[in-house]
Amino acid sequence: MSLEKLLNIPKELNSKPNISVYNLVKECYFDDFSELLVYEYLIKNDSTHKSWLLFCEDKRTDEGWVIEKNFFFYNVYHLNNRNSKSNFKRFTNKDKAFSYYIYNEIISIYENKQLK
């Protein structure tokens, strides 16, 4: 599938709120998906950051991947249902922070869908 379609899932969810994020990821996911591909896409498509930040803020779940802007830093981590943070990384580069967040978010959604 297309990297562009996969990375525009938050925009797709806004235009079609009745669609499941799990179904979109399953439909768009491809085997060669990587953090590097996400990074290269983000460098050329700056508007993608905002839609993923809003997606993160609007999630209605107690666990999952989180990205937060804290002054000049971006914090990315996985929050579990006990409010414990793991895989914490701090970035000064916005594109690297978002590529780490988006990649892990999509992989997490895809793997959780596979388990169900």
Image (spheres, rainbow, N blue to C red):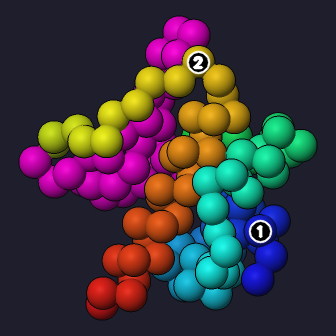
Which residue is identified by label 2?
92
Label 1, secondary structure: give it.
helix
Q: Which mark is residue 105?
A: none
- Marks 2 and 1, how far apart at CA: 25 Å
- The quadrant of the picture occupied by the N terminus is bottom right
The crowding category of the residue bearing disc 2, from other C-alpha atoms within 10 Å (few below 14, some 14 to 19, many at least 20), is some
Mark 1 crowd level (few <14, some 14–19, many ≥20, 10 Å Cα)? some
Residue in the picture at 52% in, 65% down: 106
Q: Is residue 4 above or below residue 63?
A: below
Write down the quadrant of residue 10 in the picture: bottom right
The magenta segment: 54-82
Q: Which mark is residue 3?
A: 1
Nearer to me, 63 or 42: 42
The residue lying at 63 percent from left, 62 percent from top is 34
Instruction: Tell me the quadrant of the picture where the C terminus can be found.
Output: bottom left
Identify which amino acid the numbered label 1 is placed on. Leu
Say which quarter of the image contains residue 92.
top right
User: Residue 63 in the image: x percent, y percent?
Assistant: 27, 54
> Left of 77 or right of it: where is 28?
right
Q: Secondary structure at mark 2?
A: loop
| Residue 3 to residue 26: above or below | above
